[in-house]
């Protein structure tokens, strides 16, 4: 288990002769570090296969590097094929969020109901929609280990897009959480943060948050804006405070969130983001420069 931060997802390395398997490849700008960490975890053994929980930039950004260096077969969720072939819409979509990923080729796909071998264990494939409608999670029933991706972390989950009224993303996220409850894992290996065992508490916390976001979409929209901006800071390392209004004006995701839910112009949005994140301890602002406080 390679626990990364909040720019790169975790890497799970499952080892057994002929069945060395990596779950998720991190963000593209940290590809060299990811390759080193994975090589160390493999103890110089080959990597047979790379499997993605979902095709967001922090989970598949290193796919191309991992495939070319280790020669691993690449497996993605079946539902993600439409998002990566052809690649052009993917790059358009990423531009909206100021995110990047190296284009990659995949060899095969997995869908809910499938099974695969990794690390000498048999993993069941289950749907994990919500944060990403086509995401998967992987469950090993004998030891009751769940690799949850961004469907459940110890203290939250990947953000769900805000919506007025009935929110299909929140509905789907609740389904994924119900699946986890039914599987009753003894341990969850999440896409971000350390593995954890207090699954009931994690489920209760995230369900409460989804209820709050559904009741108040503005709250959900603020959460998404915060997460996206911290991600951008983790990628860049820092941003000058005076550059933040132009930054949030440039990328469509902030404009969309602000126009639909927050009603702030780019100056007001920048001011709110910086003050709010600094108050929460997620960023440090000093000498006119904003920096994230969490590891990338
Ligand atoms: Zn993620």
Image (cartoon, rainbow, N blue to C red):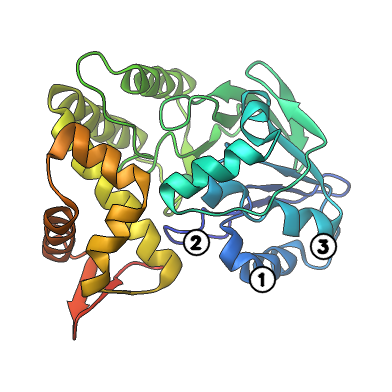
Quick one: SS at disc 3? helix
166, 109: nearer the viewer: 166
Q: Give the residue at mark 2.
A: 4
Q: Is residue 245 left or right of residue 253?
A: left
Number of the front mark, 3 or 2: 3
Q: Quadrant of residue 35?
A: bottom right
Residue 231, percent from left and from top: 38, 57
Q: Quadrant of residue 127?
A: top right
Q: Give the residue at mark 3.
A: 69
- Residue at point 71% right, 20% down? 114
Q: Is residue 191 visible?
A: no
Quick one: SS at disc 1? helix
Q: Is residue 189 visible?
A: yes
Q: Which quarter shows the N terminus? A: bottom right
Q: CA distance from mark 3 to mark 2?
A: 20 Å
Upstream in sequence: badge 2 or badge 1: 2
- Residue at point 59% right, 36% down? 89
Furthest-bottom residue in this view: 287
Image vertical order of residue 236 relative to residue 201, above or below: below
Number of the front mark, 2 or 1: 1
Q: CA distance from mark 2 to mark 1?
A: 14 Å
Neighbour tally class for label 2: few under 14, some 14-19, many 20 plus, Cα within 10 Å: some
Q: Is residue 90 left or right of residue 21?
A: left
Quick one: SS at disc 2? loop
Q: Give the residue at mark 1.
A: 32
Residue 174, percent from left and from top: 34, 20
Residue 158, percent from left and from top: 38, 40
Upstream in sequence: badge 1 or badge 3: 1
Q: CA distance from mark 1 to mark 3?
A: 10 Å
């Amino acid at each position: 288990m390679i626990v990364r931060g909040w720019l790169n997802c975790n890497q799970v390395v499952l080892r057994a002769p002929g069945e060395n398997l990596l779950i998720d490849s991190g963000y593209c700008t940290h590809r060299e570090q990811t390759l080193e960490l994975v090589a160390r975890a493999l103890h110089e053994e080959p990597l047979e296969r790379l499997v993605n929980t979902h095709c967001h930039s922090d989970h598949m950004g290193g796919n191309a590097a991992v495939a070319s260096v280790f020669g691993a077969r690449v497996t993605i969720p079946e539902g993600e094929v439409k998002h990566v072939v052809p690649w052009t819409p993917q790059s358009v979509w990423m531009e909206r969020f100021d995110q990047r990923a190296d284009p990659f080729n995949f060899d095969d796909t997995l869908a809910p109901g499938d099974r695969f071998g990794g690390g000498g264990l048999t993993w069941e494939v289950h749907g994990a929609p919500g944060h990403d409608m086509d995401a998967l999670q992987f469950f090993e029933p004998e030891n009751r280990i769940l690799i949850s991706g961004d469907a459940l972390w110890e203290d939250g989950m990947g953000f769900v897009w805000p919506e007025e009224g009935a929110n299909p993303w929140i509905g789907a996220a609740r389904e994924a959480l119900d699946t986890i409850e039914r599987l009753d894992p003894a341990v969850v290996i999440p896409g971000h943060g350390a593995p954890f065992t207090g699954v009931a508490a994690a489920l209760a916390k995230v369900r409460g948050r989804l209820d709050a976001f559904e009741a108040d979409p503005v709250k959900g929209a603020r959460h998404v804006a915060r997460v996206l901006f911290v991600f951008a800071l983790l990628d860049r390392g820092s941003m000058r405070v005076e550059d933040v209004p132009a930054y949030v004006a440039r990328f469509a995701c902030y404009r969309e969130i602000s126009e639909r839910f927050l009603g702030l112009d780019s100056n007001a949005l920048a001011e709110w983001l910086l003050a709010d994140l600094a108050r929460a301890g997620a960023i440090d602002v000093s000498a006119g420069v904003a920096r994230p406080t969490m590891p990338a």
